[in-house]
Image: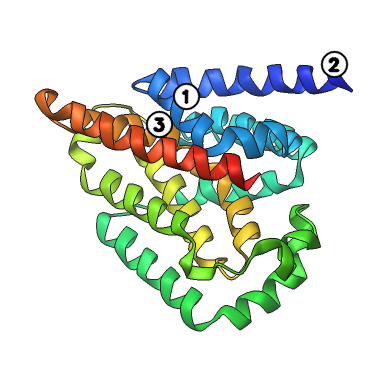
Amino acid sequence: MTVYFLIVALISFFFLYKAFDKYCLYPILGLCAYISRFYLARNFIQIRAGLSYAIILMAVQYITERDWKRYFAWVFVAYLFHHSAIIAVPLYFLCMVDIKKRHIIIGTVIAFIIAAFYSNIIRFMVADYVEDLNVGNTYIQEEYQREWGLANPMIYFQTFLLLVYTFTEDRMRQTTSHYLTIRNAYFYSTVILIVLSCYTALSGRVSSMFATLEMVIIPSIAYSFMKKDRWIAYLGMGAALTTIFYLNYYGH
């Protein structure tokens, strides 16, 4: 069993390394963001899902290149490890749409409205489809998911990062040629997190795949500051990441 875990971990980090190398401006800061936000829950608990997500993150580059064959081939490989990889399918088609800043704002507002006023409909739909994503009924049980709803602080953390990343587009485009793909993927993740917020654990699990792109977004935001002011960004991000790691550590 130990050998199995070791092999899966090595493969997962291989694909994560490829993603860091391809998209991340400051890989060390990106690694810190990944460890504080996802490492404990994913690499120690959601092992198959972690490998599946790492494969898809590496494959995101093929969306930018409009290489659908390679993208969906890697999604299929990821699906063999964990069925939740199916969540990556709509992203390719979403990225074919010319999404503007105003669409990000409107989409986010609509997601909040749905979460606030149509949670009963969401619960009804989720009950029918949750098994198809291989996340199990455990994630929709009240005693498991704590019923944070829209009080979940990660919703506002992701929304804040999304808006900052969106409204610094001119600067962010200088950090990676995959900017629009990454932004759209993170927008997709944030909308999922908000809409499914009536199921705290489920929303976090389903949105987690592309929320991992924070390892690219957070270092890029530091770059958006003037050189003389970047220490402020590093200090703020360091404090935020330390807090998140602390909450994750004691939450598990």
- Whether 231 is drawn above or below 105: the answer is above
Position of residue 144 in the picture relative to residue 152 (left or right)? right
Kindly identify the residue that appears in the image at 70 percent across and 48 percent down: 84
User: Is label 2 in contact with label 3 (beta carbons under 8 Å)?
Assistant: no
Local crowd at mark 3 within 10 Å, few (<14), some, or many (≥20)? Answer: many
Kindly identify the residue that appears in the image at 54 percent across and 18 percent down: 17
- Amino acid carrying label 2: it is Val
Please state which of the two labelled residues, at mark 2 or mark 3, is closer to the viewer. Answer: 2
For the residues labelled 2 and 3, the Cα–Cα distance comes to 31 Å
Label 1: element kind: helix
Label 1 vs 3, first from the N-terminus: 1
Label 3: element kind: helix
- Whether 120 is drawn above or below 9: the answer is below
Task: Count up the numbered dots.
Answer: 3
> Where residue 125 sits: x, y (%)?
68, 74
For the residues labelled 1 and 3, the Cα–Cα distance comes to 9 Å
Label 1 vs 2, first from the N-terminus: 2
Please state which of the two labelled residues, at mark 1 or mark 3, is closer to the viewer. Answer: 1
User: Is label 1 in contact with label 3 (beta carbons under 8 Å)?
Assistant: no
Position of residue 220 in the picture relative to residue 49 (left or right)? left
Kindly identify the residue that appears in the image at 32 percent across and 67 percent down: 106
- Amino acid carrying label 1: it is Leu
Judging by the rendered image, the residue that carries numbered circle 2 is 3
> Where residue 242 sits: x, y (%)?
43, 35
- Amino acid carrying label 3: it is Val
Judging by the rendered image, the residue that carries numbered circle 3 is 216
Toward the right, the furthest residue is 1
For the residues labelled 1 and 2, the Cα–Cα distance comes to 24 Å
Image quadrant in which the N terminus is located:
top right
Label 2 vs 3, first from the N-terminus: 2
> Where residue 7 sits: x, y (%)?
78, 17
